[in-house]
Amino acid sequence: MSIVSVNSEADLKNLLDDLPIADEIFEKAALNRQMCLTKPPGSLGRLEEIAIWLAGWQRRELPRMENVVCLVFAGNHGVAECGVSAFPTEVTAQMVQNFESGGAAINQLTELANATLKVVPLSLDNPTDNFLYEPAMSAQECCEAINIGARSVPPDANILLLGEMGIANSTSAAAVALATFGGRAQDWVGRGTGINDEALKNKCNVVGEAVDFHSSHHKSAFDVLRTVGGRELAAIAGAVLEARHRRIPVILDGFISTAAAAVWHKENITALDHTMVSHQSIEVGHQNLICKLGKRAILNLDMRLGEASGAAVALLIVKAAIATHNGMSTFAQAGVSEND
């Protein structure tokens, strides 16, 4: 049974007001271990930081990786009818089938990284409403999507990777980011599936007009998800919240999953402390979003595929962090003299 069960906006407020934090005792133990390993202190750079971060959230000096779970949520968007994507909405279901048959990039990457892949389609035959003219979801639909995301998180996962699939969901993510952090539509809108200049201009106009249309309702994270979000974005947000309450560290993928998670930052600026951003997408919106969240991506490979592909690649770096942290000898064990 999931910890997160949302029937109203008030339920979300209670969950966001009472968030577990990393365990400082285990963070300190992991830091002390790093200082004793056979290397100059700090010489493994961010690998050391990652290991210490994991120790605090997993509440153990030696973090584990035997149960890494990758969740990919899929949804369709009514705003796709505005010509904001290079592909039709039918592609979402086709790609889900590709995931399930093992033919997508994420299948190869999770197999390489020894992570369990779970694909969660959300009412693909029933796209959200077109948020240019009306809220994308009713309050009940948004709650249901959040709860699906929360229920999808295995309680015994050591690390959670979060990704998505959904035609037009980069438009939704841009609208969510604009509604959450402000600025201009151009600050958040990118080419997504590879649209041309004319379509990009149209996409900017759609995002800007939609956020203006719903602006009077954007008083909370729930309002943002409900009005300009999508089912898969709400599910990712629910999974992030469930993982926090279970102290499961999360590796976010690209722009869409980071935007979905970032709505909680609107309510509690510490809400994403248990998350890392896997990579900096080539999407301008993702670069701005990472900056707004005060985070630093693990990788920068000019990726923009989605489907948790960047998170799975970053997982290999996380594995390197754990391997060195757990497996290296201390100076005393190796009989190596430390510098005085």
Image (tube, helix red, strand yellow):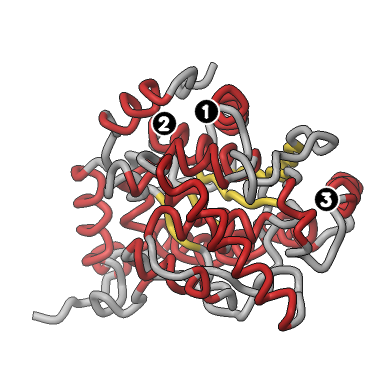
Amino acid type, callout 1: Pro
Q: Quadrant of the C terminus?
A: bottom left
In this rendering, would 79 be left or right of 50?
right
Q: Which of marks 3 and 1 is nearer the N terminus?
A: 3
Q: Tell me what residue is drawn at x 51 percent, y 68 percent.
A: 185
Of all residues, the one furthest to the left in this rendering is 340
Up-down relation of residue 34 to residue 223 (above or below): below
Q: Tell me what residue is drawn at x 73 percent, y 37 percent.
A: 120
Up-down relation of residue 89 to residue 290 (above or below): above
The residue carrying mark 1 is: 155
User: Residue 125 placed where, x, y %?
Assistant: 85, 36
Q: Tell me what residue is drawn at x 75 percent, y 58 percent.
A: 82
Q: Tell me what residue is drawn at x 61 percent, y 73 percent.
A: 190
In the rendering, which numbered label is found on residue 246?
2
* Cα gap from disc 2 to disc 1, whole angstroms: 7 Å
The residue carrying mark 3 is: 92
Badge 1 local density, few (<14 within 10 Å), some, or many (20+)? some
- On the image, which quarter does residue 118 sit in? top right
